[in-house]
Every structure is written in C-alpha cells, then in structure tokens.
Amino acid sequence: MSAATPPLQPPIVDPAQTFGSVTDKISSIVLSKKSPLVWLVGFGIAFSLTMLLLYSIGYLLVKGIGIWGVNVPVGWGFDIVNFVWWIGIGHAGTLISAILLLLRQTWRNSINRFAEAMTLFAVACAGLYPVLHLGRPWLMYWLFPYPNTMGLWPQFRSPLVWDVFAVSTYASVSLLFWFVGLIPDLATLRDRSQHRFARFAYGILAMGWRGSARHWQVYDTCSLLLAGLATPLVVSVHTVVSFDFAVGLIPGWHATIFPPYFVAGAIYSGFAMVMTLAIPLRKIYGLEGLITMRHLQNMAKVMLATGLIVAYGYMVEAFMAWYSGNPYERFMIWNRMTGPYAMGYWALIFCNVIAPQTLWSSKIRNSVPVLFVLSIIVNIGMWLERFIIVVTSLHRDFLPSSWGMYRPTVWDWSTFAGTIGLFAALLFLFIRFLPMISIFEIRQILPQAEVTEPQK
Amino acid sequence: MSQIFHRSTNTFSRITIFGAVFILALLTWAFGELSRSTYATQAGVDREQPVPFSHAHHVGGIGLDCRYCHTSVENSSFAGIPPTKTCMNCHSQIWLSSPTLEPVRESFRTGKSIKWTRVHDLPDFAYFNHSIHLKKGVGCGTCHGRVDKMPLVYQERSLQMEWCLDCHRNPEKYVRPRADVFRPDYEPPEDQMALGRRLVSEYSIENRTSCSTCHR
C-alpha cells in the first residue's frame, strides 16, 4: 500500500488550490451578503424544530416528567438514551482536533473546525437531557459542589456526579480549543470584511490578532497544550458516562467491558456524524477541493475500526452472559435477542455490525452516496444501541411482578426532534457566520507552504 | 483602512480577563450572603399577631412555664398552641376591659380560634418532633432563643438545613441536662464540650444525619 496509486490515495487538498484561492473560497461563504437557498430552507426547518424543543421543555416545566413515557420499572428512557447518543457524537471533534493534532495527521486540517463545532453543539444538546430529567430542573445547580445553606455536598461516590464534572469539563475544554483555533481565521475575516459591524464583531473575537511571529509561536504552544489537555477527555468522558450504567447493579449494565466499548462507540458515532455533515456540505458549498475523497476514506476507515471494537463489545456481552453462569445475565441477553425489543436489537446489529463491513471494499469507500447512507445507518444503529442498553436492561426487573414496557410518548419524540433541530440550527448559524474550514491550517498543508532551505 | 478599535481597547480587554475572575467570585460571595441573610430567612423579624401577646411579660415577667401553654411539647411532634380557654384562666379575672384583649374574649364567646401567625414554619418535607429533642436534652432556647425577652416572638435562628445539621452532626455542642431544658435563662457552662460529651453518651444521642431522619 506504500506506493499508493492515485485512486487509492487521493491528495489531502486539491493540488490546484493556492493560498489565495483557499482564503477566498472559505471566507467568501461567510462574507457574502446572500445565503444560499438550501441554507435558508434548512435553517428554517431547524429553527422550527428548535421552537418545538422550547415548547416541549416549557410543557415539561409546567407538567413535570410525567409527560414522558418513563415509569417504574423503566425510569430512564429517551432522556438518557439521547444524552448518551449526543455526547457520543461529540467525541469525533475532540479526537480529530486533539489526538490527530498530536499525531500530526495533517488531513485533519480540513475537517477539524466543523467537527469541533459539531462537538460543541452535540454536547449542548446532550447537556439538556440530564438537566431536564431531574424532575425539578430549576434546582440543577445542586449538582455542583458549592457552599450551600443545606450544609451538604453532592454524593461524590456517585458516577452521576462524576458525569457532571466530565461533561462540563468536556464542554469547556472543547469550547476553548475551538475558540483558540478560530482566532487567526477571525482576524482574516476582520481584515476582509467590508461591513462595519462585521469588522467590529470579528475584531472583538479575534482578540487583537496581528499574525506576528510571536503570536504564532504563542498560538502553537497554546494549541499543543490544549490538545494535551483534551486528549484524556476523549477517553474519560464516555468512560464516565458508561460508569453511570456499569456501577449500577443491573444485568445488562453491570459489565467491565462498558468503558472501552462506550468510548469506541462514541468515536464510531462521532465519525459517522462528521461524515453525514461533511458530504452534503462539500457538495452545497463546492468544497470538494478541500474535503477530498482522502478525508472520506480516512473517516470510513476509522468507522470500520471503531465499528469492529463495538462489535467485539456486543460479542463480549453475549459471551459473558453465558460464561458467567448467572441466570439473570443469561435471561437479560436472551430477552434482548428474543424479547419484546428483539427487533431493535437485531436492527442495531445490522446497522452497527453488518452494514459497516462493506467498508472493507475500497469501491464502497470511494462512493460518496454509499458512504452517506452508511453514515446515517451507523447513526441510527448507535442510537438503537443506547436504547437497547437503557431500556431492555430495565424493563425486565428481577421480580416478574414488576415487569413493564417502555413506550415513548409524543413529548419524548418532540424533545428528541427538537434537539436535532437545535443541533442543526446551531450548525447552520456556524456555517453562515464562521469559517467552517480552518483557513490557516489548510494554507499550512498546501504545497506552496513547503519551504526549502537553500543549501549553504 | 482605518482603525476599528481605539488604543484603550487593549487595556480594557486585559482588565476584563481579570474582571471575569473577580466578578464570578463576587457573585458567588453575594449569593452566599444573600441566601443566609435575614432577608431570606426572616430571622429576627417579629410578626404581627392578632393579639400582641408578649412572651417577655408572661415568661420573663410572670414566670409561666413553657408547658403551661404548649402542653403537648413533651409527648408530641407538635408543641401545641393553647386554646383560648388557657388565656381565659387568668383573663376572665384580670384585664377584663382591656380593648387589646377583645379578640380573646370574642374567641371565647364565639368558640372560634384566634388566628395566630406562625413564626417557626418548617417546610412540609422536613419532619420535626419536639418531644424527642427535649428527651435528648435540647433546650427550648437552643432553637427558639431567649423567648422570655421577646415582646413579640421572632425566629431566632435561620432554620436552614445547615443549621439543623450543625447540631445533628455535633450534638455535644448544644445538649444540656434534661432538668434544664425548660429554663429560659439557661447559659451553657464553660466546659460545654465536656458536659456535652458526657450527656451524649448518657442520653444515647446518635448523630442522626441520614436523609430519612428528617425527610421521611
């Protein structure tokens, strides 16, 4: 594979691109006065769904969580399913921005900006759910340790408290990383913008960036340090999320495989989401020269690898149920495969294990429409995985007298649709007002940027 | 191209970085102070009552025992608000024509209770029992303050959970001999900690800090 033929290893960036063309291309999307029709329609739909979210939350605050389908024995439903799904989607951003930066994978430069933005928006959607499911969301600040008049601290031995710290750290480090990475590009926009207000707004955000050698040196140190800080977060956040389950003594949750299996699943779904977004974006804005087939292929390979880890996780779950000899564990896995939610289980196996095996073929990895469909299948599969883990483990309690079924209500669905709308709306705004591809990082990997020292 | 920002923006933006830290610290401090202030707890604010009944006069002056009116305090969770008949034990003989006492006489005539304004009102989700506190050597004054010096009763303490827990975590700081629980003028001795520790073991006082002790 080392002597790569062109169709196997397409270039990271179209060789026809120059410093000027890259800057023009990316900044013109933001600075043009007109929004494309697709943008207007898409933002309109996303905004309407966001309004639906606000309505659902408003109704929830008035009526309480009884409007959802959760009840004994299934006390966690769409709230936790969607929380885990969204936070998993966020993982691609940190992996791409932090780990691939430290590993000097320059192909990441085209996709890191919007993958990080996607991370932030996904974490914002994820963060809503645990707060809303509290029952009295207005007391959510009780989750934080602060010197309160109750003379109490949160229960530090509970993974639910670790979750608060894991997610809030993740959100703040991701935000910081994303913002710091934006500074040089914000300065470019400030300098190229014709509009007074835009110059002022970008100017404030650019924090006085002049692009001096000292600025760049400080910038490089800063982004490497942040990458170092963010790297453990790629692993830690979903590990802690998996502890929410694994520490509980419920068959189907209480498994040591959970942390690595959750982290792999998170990166899997994250890359699937990056792919789902990147493919239409490069088409609509004509960015095929910057987000090339090389990127799509690389992401497809990451999906294949993490998908295999996830498949291993499913296998181990089934194996341990048999090997443990524990009747409850055995019943749990048998119930998953043949019980009332069996359809969901097999759909998840199809989406997450069988469908992605097509990625072994380079023909598939080169077909943009197939990749797009696959990425959506994986997104659905990962959502089903969380649904199966949360719901099937709970709905058959230890006592058959307390068995029950979970049926999401219209409010469960409207909140879910609403967060998809919020995610999309934030993404549309991001595309319109900020450079969705890092201008200066693309310039760095152009052939023009190669400096050859004259031999003395 | 003209300058977008004035030179002073540099200084201003530097200040905001530190400013954020101080503003956050200030807000946290203000929130803590406000939530413990008498404005939030209403401690020390005396309440208007239909009859300006003075504990200072009846307890401090005449020397009535707490249990003369609050009869159920030793046997019940509720200390008890006396019926009008208790007032009339004396006031059928004295201050017969006082206009201030007209609501009392009216209540006695009609049989309708006087609507006192509650001063110590714990939230409904907190269970509190007077009798057990007395039996374990917590005096009235430990929570209610010097009632014998209050012309109109006010809440002495914050009644916040951290205040309850202060004693529930370290009862030796506050307990007194059972014989002294009704003495309004009781002052803790110099060696309260030594006495407290002795009484804690003598009365078998345990640190009741489980959630369900109070939130049942």
Image (cartoon, rainbow, N blue to C red):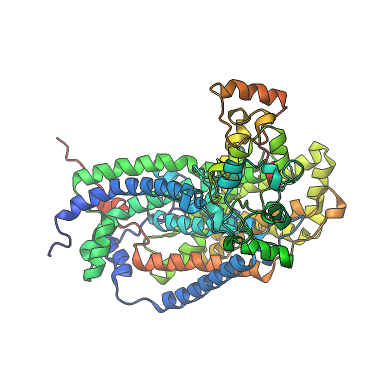
Q: Quadrant of the C terminus of chain A?
A: top left
Residue B164 visible in image: no
* Residue at point 41%, 60% (across, down): A291
Find residue A316 and report its image quarter.
Answer: top right
State the residue in front, A456 or A433. A433
Instruction: Specify the farthest residue to the left.
Output: B2
Find residue B136 and report its image quarter.
Answer: top right
State the residue in front, B83 or A34. B83
Tell me where residue A126 appears, x and y as whole percent: 54, 56
Tell me where residue B23 appears, x and y as whole percent: 34, 49
Total label count?
0
Left or right of A167: which side holds B92?
Answer: right
Find residue A139 and report its image quarter.
Answer: bottom right
Q: Is residue A29 above or below residue A3?
A: below
Left or right of B160: which side holds A70?
Answer: right
Residue A395 visible in image: yes
State the residue in front, A265 or B41. B41
Tell me where residue B190 appears, x and y as whole percent: 53, 22
Instruction: Specify the farthest residue to the right.
Output: A401
State the residue in front, A142 or B14. A142
* Residue at point 25%, 42% (across, down): A217
Left or right of B70: which side holds B193?
Answer: left
Tell me where residue A265 appears, x and y as whole percent: 60, 50
Q: Is residue B12 above or below residue B73?
A: below
